Image: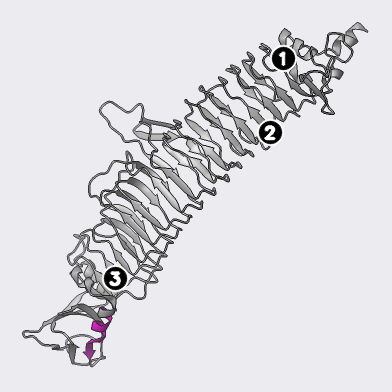
């Protein structure tokens, strides 16, 4: 009989915890019953807690009671709310309390850790020395988390929950923060040092962590004086970001004598940004502000491997020649003209500029471009399809590996290099454009492009070849002097030239020696160079 009674008792080794619970009564706020009323847990007054008595407790407040251990608390199997703040707890392992929704364990050492159940909704741990790594991810009901002044915290993962409040002020050692996939509307990261981990090992510069607050409902993000190498705030409702005071952390463990610049990963895509301010002196590994409402972009002194501002409403992009960008994406905007800067290549390994080596690519497709000026840049690949380009300037002295001009039916002038750029290929870009864009004026003299579109159209209409088709003799006429002509086949091979020895608006030449077929005639006039098609019968 005595053994049966003893088996019903709850073992609570910590005398302070047991005393606090036994002190509960309707006249204090220590305990609430299942009906939500304050009551005495020790219903029979025997100075012990039976299991049946523990199962009647819905809420406990044992704060500020010098408690060092929560052993025995799991017997309170209906407990939904626990305040154990301001004690001497090294740990708070309460994951066995399946009904627990509200926990305040603030102002405790907690250096051994904390573990809660899946249904926790409110968690206050401020002013605690919680361990360096805290994983609260996939707490599907967690909506409130207070970690203010948890100075030992290094790595926090509270992703994939329902957080609407996250307090991190004073987390001075926090290096990694993942609060993605929550319901946050505001987040203050000002004056924090959430750098991530940037280091050099095995000839490779790597980093992890930093800040990931993507896939929330953020309308306000404060990052003033934030130090980080990684910031992902994509898929939110932000209308403005001021990151002008953002700084980067240094790379650790680099070999002696090797100086590497830290770089930034910054993703603010898929928001509603109409204003964006960034620190223009940063070195950027990846910068993505695509899918926003930006109308202009000013880039000054940035060194970037990848810079993406596609899918906006940008009508003007200003990139200074002091910026160094490897891959630039300005597609799906409303640009009518684009003049590319120098854009020297950025080395992939250490993100340091390496002079004037060719950059990788420019994506400017799906805009409203009428002018594309690539004369300054030394870019290898250009994607400019789905525009309305009239003038293309690409006299940049390098062999452009790939140029996509599909769906640009109104090209009237192209300025390109007129000398071979590949030792294995005797033809110049001028030669190739003459065959590829037979209806356009192709020149190596870019000053001809100053002719307005309307003037060029008038000049084009006043340059003619007749008869066309021709059998033996053709006449080339213009309202201006016809200085010379060059006739090429559709493979770009020059097959005939002729010059006027006098000032004349007509040039006569024989085409008897040409085989039947279609040819491209480049006509040099006093108002520029024009290209016409000739059919030889």
> SS for tag 2?
loop
Q: At 83% from the left edge and 10% from the top edge, which residue is drawn?
A: 48
Give percent across and percent down for residue 70: 70, 16
The 10 Å Cα crowd at callout 1, few under 14, some 14 to 19, many 20 or more, is some
Compared to residue 400, the image places residue 58 above or below, namely above
320 horizontally vs 175: left or right: left
Distance of mark 3 from mark 1, alpha carbons?
Answer: 79 Å
| Res 468 seen here | yes
Which residue is label 2 attached to? Answer: 121
Q: Are marks 3 and 1 in contact (CB under 8 Å)?
A: no
Say what secondary structure mark 1 lies in. Answer: loop
Which residue in the protein does label 3 denote?
A: 391
On the image, numbered disc 1 is attached to which residue? 71
Q: Is residue 396 magenta?
A: no
Which numbered marker is on residue 500?
none
Using the numbered discs, state the Cα–Cα distance from disc 1 to disc 2 in whole angstroms: 22 Å
Q: Mark 1 or mark 2, which has the lower sequence index?
A: 1
The stretch of residues the image draws in magenta is 456-466
Q: In the picture shown, does residue 32 fall above or below 392?
A: above
Nearer to us of marks 2 and 3 is 2
Q: Is 172 left or right of 410, judged from the image as shown?
A: right
Element marked by disc 3: strand
Q: Which residue occupies the foreground of this view, 288 or 205?
A: 288
Position in image of residue 294 (x %, y %): 44, 56
Q: Position of residue 332 (x, y in %)?
A: 44, 61
Q: Position of residue 398 (x, y in %)?
A: 23, 58
* Between discs 3 and 1, the one toward the N terminus: 1
How many residues crowd around disc 3 within 10 Å: few (fewer than 14), some, or many (20 or more)?
many
């Amino acid at each position: 009989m005595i053994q049966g009674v003893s088996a019903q008792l709850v073992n609570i080794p910590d005398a302070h915890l047991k005393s606090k619970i036994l002190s509960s009564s309707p006249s204090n706020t220590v305990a609430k019953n299942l009906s939500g009323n304050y009551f005495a847990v020790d219903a029979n007054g025997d100075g012990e807690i039976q299991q049946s008595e523990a199962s009647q407790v819905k809420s406990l407040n044992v704060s500020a009671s010098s408690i060092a251990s929560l052993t025995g608390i799991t017997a309170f199997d209906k407990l939904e709310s626990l305040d154990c703040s301001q004690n001497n707890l090294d740990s708070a392992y309460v994951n066995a309390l399946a009904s627990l929704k509200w926990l305040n364990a603030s102002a405790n050492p907690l250096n051994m850790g904390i573990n809660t159940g899946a249904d926790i909704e409110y968690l206050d741990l401020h002013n605690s020395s919680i361990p360096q790594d805290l994983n609260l991810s996939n707490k599907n009901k967690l909506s409130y988390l207070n970690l203010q002044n948890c100075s030992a915290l290094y790595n926090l993962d509270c992703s994939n929950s329902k957080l609407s409040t996250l307090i991190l002020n004073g987390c001075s050692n926090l290096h990694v923060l993942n609060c993605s996939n929550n319901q946050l509307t505001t987040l203050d990261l000002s004056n924090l040092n959430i750098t991530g981990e940037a280091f050099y090992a095995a000839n490779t510069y790597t980093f992890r962590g930093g800040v990931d607050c993507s896939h929330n409902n953020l309308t306000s993000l404060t990052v003033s004086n934030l130090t980080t190498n990684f910031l992902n705030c994509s898929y939110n409702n932000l209308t403005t970001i001021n990151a002008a005071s953002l700084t980067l952390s240094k790379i650790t463990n680099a070999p002696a004598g090797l100086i590497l610049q830290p770089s930034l990963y910054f993703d603010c895509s898929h928001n509603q940004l109409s204003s964006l301010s960034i620190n223009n002196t940063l070195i950027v590994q990846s910068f993505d502000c695509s899918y926003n409402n930006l109308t202009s972009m000013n880039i000054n002194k940035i060194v970037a491997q990848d810079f993406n501002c596609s899918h906006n409403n940008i009508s003007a992009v200003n990139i200074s020649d002091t910026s160094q960008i490897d891959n630039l994406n300005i597609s799906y905007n409303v640009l009518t003209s684009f003049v590319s800067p120098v854009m020297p290549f950025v080395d992939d390994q250490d993100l340091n500029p390496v002079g004037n080596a060719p950059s990788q690519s420019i994506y400017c497709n799906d805009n409203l471009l009428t002018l594309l000026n690539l004369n300054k840049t030394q870019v290898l690949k250009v994607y400019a399809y789905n525009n309305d380009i009239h003038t293309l300037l690409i006299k940049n002295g390098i062999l452009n590996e790939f140029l996509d001009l599909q769906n640009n039916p109104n090209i009237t002038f192209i300025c390109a290099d007129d000398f071979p750029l590949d030792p294995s290929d005797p033809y110049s870009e001028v030669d190739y454009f003459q065959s590829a864009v037979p209806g356009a004026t192709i020149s190596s003299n870019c000053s001809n492009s100053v002719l307005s579109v309307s003037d060029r159209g008038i000049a084009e209409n006043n340059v003619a070849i007749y008869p066309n088709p021709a059998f033996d003799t053709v006449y080339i006429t213009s309202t201006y002097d016809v200085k010379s002509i060059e006739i090429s086949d559709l493979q770009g091979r020059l097959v005939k030239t002729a010059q006027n020895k006098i000032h004349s608006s007509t040039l006569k030449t024989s085409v008897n020696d040409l085989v039947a077929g279609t040819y491209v005639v480049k006509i040099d006039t006093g108002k520029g160079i024009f290209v016409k098609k000739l059919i030889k019968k």
